[in-house]
Image: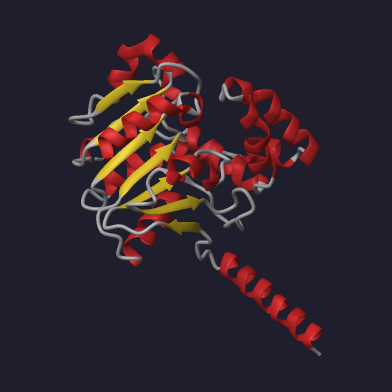
């Protein structure tokens, strides 16, 4: 009898989760640790679990309340029917407002960094500070200076490419690509695992939408302090980087001393020094 009840409860929970997702109710995953007057919210990048912030959080949860997010459809979190940058921004903003989080510091890596910029621009009174780890207001403009967003962006081909790969193919694709993004090769399998346990349609849709995102004008609306930490290679094109951030008043642009895109892994000591100085 006990076994039957357990099965019924499990079925009810699965059914409830299904209906929540079907109705478009956010299935944002948040992990809360620490206790302090200052709340720090951490947003991971494309196809990454919130666990990407594990070492960072360990240094702040003793004196701060740390909230680590994992987005819908990513690393085992149930997906939503819509995966766009604007909708993910709305989910995070609603989370902060609904939970009455008072002026958090928002830290975002890569795509999460763009979400931090959007949150601060569209909700000027929401955050006390933002930290952007290796992200640009318009990544596509680096390779295409005349880039303009498409009004009716068709993501079907990107989604088809993502969903057309089986798990082994997708994992191998990531393992082959990640050495260009993370110098700490011990992290590659972990990051690839997050990707392969993500919903493939979500990855296709959000990646396509991210490539069509340009917030260079919108960041004019940001009034809180902002720290932008960038990988060393961006120092080679400083004029282009500074042009992208010219509308963000008082911005602190700093460049890592070594490593690649995952600065928190590749240049950990420098990264921790910059973050600690800015937060304090």
Return the x and y of residue 219 as percentages of the image width and height: 27, 36
Compared to 5, does 188 lie above or below?
above
Q: Residue at x 40, y 43 (%)?
A: 59
Is 122 drawn above or below residue 7 in the view shown? above
Residue at image location 65% in from the left, 40% down from the top: 195
Q: Quadrant of residue 130?
A: top left
Q: Position of residue 199 (x, y in %)?
A: 65, 49
In the rendered structure, the answer to whether residue 36 lies left or right of residue 26 reads: left
Residue 93 image point, x, y percent: 35, 55
* Residue drawn at the location 56% of the way across and 41% of the way down: 48
Residue 157 showing in the rendered view: no
Q: Taking the image as drawn, is residue 182 in sight? A: yes
**Residue 50 picture location, percent across and down:** 52, 47
Judged left or right of residue 233, residue 279 is: left
Q: Residue at x 22, y 35 (%)?
A: 220
Of 215 and 225, the residue lying toward us = 225
- Name of the residue lying farthest toward the top: 236
Find residue 116 and report its image quarter. Answer: top left
Q: How many marks?
A: 0
């Amino acid at each position: 009898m006990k076994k039957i009840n357990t099965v019924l409860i499990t079925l009810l929970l699965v059914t409830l989760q299904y209906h929540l997702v079907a109705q478009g109710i956010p299935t944002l995953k948040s992990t809360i640790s620490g206790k302090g007057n200052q709340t720090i919210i951490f947003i991971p990048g494309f196809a990454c679990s919130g666990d990407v912030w594990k070492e960072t959080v360990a240094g702040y949860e003793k004196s701060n309340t740390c909230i680590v997010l994992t987005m819908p459809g990513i690393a085992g979190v149930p997906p939503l029917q819509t995966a766009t940058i604007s909708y993910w921004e709305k989910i995070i903003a609603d989370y902060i407002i609904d939970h009455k989080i008072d002026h958090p510091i928002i830290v975002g890596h890569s795509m999460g960094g763009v979400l931090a910029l959007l949150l601060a621009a569209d909700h000027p009174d929401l955050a006390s500070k933002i930290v952007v780890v290796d992200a640009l207001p318009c990544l596509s403009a680096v390779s295409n200076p005349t880039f303009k967003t498409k009004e009716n962006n068709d993501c079907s081909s990107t989604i088809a490419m993502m969903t057309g790969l089986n798990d082994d193919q997708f994992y191998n694709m990531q393992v082959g690509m990640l050495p260009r993004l993370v110098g700490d090769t011990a992290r590659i399998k972990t990051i690839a695992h997050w990707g392969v346990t993500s919903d493939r349609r979500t990855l296709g849709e959000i990646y396509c939408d991210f490539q069509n995102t340009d917030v260079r004008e919108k960041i004019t609306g940001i009034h809180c302090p902002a720290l932008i930490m960038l990988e060393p290679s961006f120092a080679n094109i400083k004029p282009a980087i500074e042009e992208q951030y010219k509308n963000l008043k008082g911005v602190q642009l700093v460049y890592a001393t070594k490593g690649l895109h995952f600065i928190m892994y590749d240049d950990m000591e420098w990264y921790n020094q910059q973050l600690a100085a800015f937060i304090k």
